[in-house]
Amino acid sequence: MTDEVLLQGCLKNDAYAQQELYYKYSPKMLSVCYRYAKSREDAEDMLQEGFIKVFTQMSKYENRGSLEGWILRIIVHTCINHLKKNKKFNEHVDLAYAGELIIKEDNIPAILQAKQVVECIRSLPIGYRTVLNLFAIEGYSHKEIGFMLEIEESTSRSQYTRAKNMLEDLLIKKNILQPKKENTKWLSSVKAH
Amino acid sequence: MKRYSKEEMDELLKEKSDQYLLYPSDRVWKNIHKELHPSNGWRYAALTVVFFFIASLSIHVKKNELAKAYLNNRDSLYQYIETPSASLANNTLQLPEIFIPYHGLKQSTDASNINLLASRIAHTTALERSTEISLPKNISGRSQINLPVAIASVNNTVKEEKKHTLSETIDLVVTTAKKISKDIKWQVYGGPSIGYRSLEGKATRNIYQYAVYSLSTNAVFARDVKDVVNHRPAMGFELGTAMIYPLSKRINVRAGVQANYNQYQIKAFSSIPEIATYAVNNSSSSTPLSTVSVYRNNQGLSPATIQNEHYMISVPVGLDYRVSGTDKLNFSIGSSIQPTYVFANYSYLLSSNLQNYAKEPSLNRNWNINGAVEASVNFEHKGYRWSIAPQFRYQMLSSFKEKYPIKENLMDMGIKIGIIKTIK
């Protein structure tokens, strides 16, 4: 069933069309929620809240972009609102302090690379990962992120830089990311001396 | 496993995040659906209203009877008290065997009040001993009364009255029960019925996900169960007995025990043994439940007819209302609610992908609630009252447990033939 057919059904509040649309996009949207959420249960709550908004605000969709993109925006905003309610994303971690953060690597099942990457992102402090998710994956600008999270644009930039550095370390540890060769050479030469 | 360079990190994050899919538990869709399409509440609301209607009506009738009995007794008492002097003149009282209520007597110097008080005391005391008594000399006629003695007598009397209150209440209850039992009629009924069902649900799209790998239980998604099931009604029966009590000339309340046999048939195809999987919804996730099936819903080895049978026993409680007619011939309508226990259930359940039929007793619900409506013609013939009533019976809750996503509500349409006899 095409998005257009599903859309028309959803506009008529047809349960069958709503279910089809939900089944089509819920796996992707849940993984989005999961990247923001503290737990799987939280992610499902976000997804539920988000899809209720999607169905009740379907008439506001103006066919300008893809339906998936529109749903994604609603879901992401729902996640952000959820975090704001719990005031969790305000958590700020300095880079110096971040180095001491204990990342629970036991929680990172080494089944698949994609899961590992997502779990690495989720291991970041919530403020970092929110900015990282919004900027690197969802593609929002720092200005938009600043507006969404009610923080300075510069704060968003610095949070992103720090998040990226932390994530790099984690991914290198997990053998997903290659360390920079020149750094390795430099390190080995220091060790030799 | 590919290793990415640092420069590829942005690409890595985007690519891997897009690849990573998570499948929500069925709870999420259920909650969304409930939020968007609230329904079914009316069934429970109707049930509750019927129940409270029956309960309040019964209480009201009972109260009226008690009040009536009390008023009768009180009237005869006051009639007696209002004319004490005439009886007192003879020093002998013919007292009825009734309880004299004590209504908080106060100390008073008024001689007439005291006389009345004294006479009440005398009556009360008299009840203990005999219906015929001689009054004490100091309270005969309108003579002077020793007040402290009279009050002391009152205190003693209060204790006695309490005893009387209990015994009289018991008597009243027994009397009322006897009266009610005289009015109770006993009905035996039975008759054929046609069993069928309403079915609701879709092929569930449960995918059991372990990381990125997933296993789909079904090839066909979201097809409505009504579109793929070919079922037809079959004969059943009903047999029961009930006590009927008239609340008024037009309204009867009834309660009893009833046995029902319901069946319907499903057109299917026999097949080689296959795995039938049932998506079972738990509180937060779905887990598959598999069993072996030798019936397919379509395209099998040869056509086959499956029979789903239910044996149940229930306790119907309901009301009848006489719309028109006399005691000898009348037309009534009635309804009842029937807490039901399904003691044998031989049902084939449709698998979650709507492809196979198999028995899976763990998904059957044993306790249920049925509702029934009927219209009856009642007439007298050779000393018995006969009742012929077309009726419709509907099962309020699904035959299957909540965790099975397909909902089935059984229905029976039948003719109830009853014979009614007054218990003496």
Image (spheres, coloured by chain):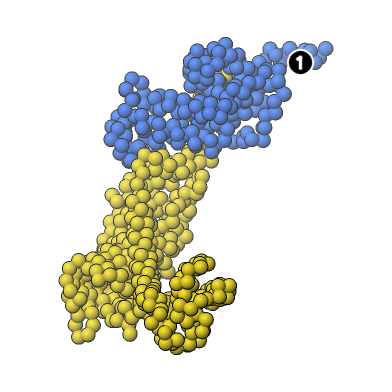
Q: Choose between B166 and B422: the one closer to the eye.
A: B166
Residue at the location (57% across, 75% down)?
B149
Q: Choose between A20 and B141: the one closer to the eye.
A: B141
Residue at the location (58% across, 32% down)?
A38
Look at mark 1 in the image and give the residue it sits on.
A188
Horizontal arrangement in the rendering, residue B198 relative to residue A143 (left or right): left
Which residue in the rendered view is the most extreme toward the right?
A: A193
Q: Is residue A64 above or below residue B355?
A: above
Position of residue B32 measured from the top left corner of the image (x, y, whole percent): 41, 39
Q: Give the residue type that dot 1 points to.
A: Ser
Position of residue B101 measured from the top left corner of the image (x, y, whole percent): 45, 73
Residue A159 is drawn in which quadrant?
top right
| Chain B color in figure | yellow
Chain letter tied to blue? A
Q: Is residue B154 visible?
A: yes
Viewport quadrant of the N terminus of chain A: top left
Which residue in the rendered view is the most extreme toward the front?
A: B144
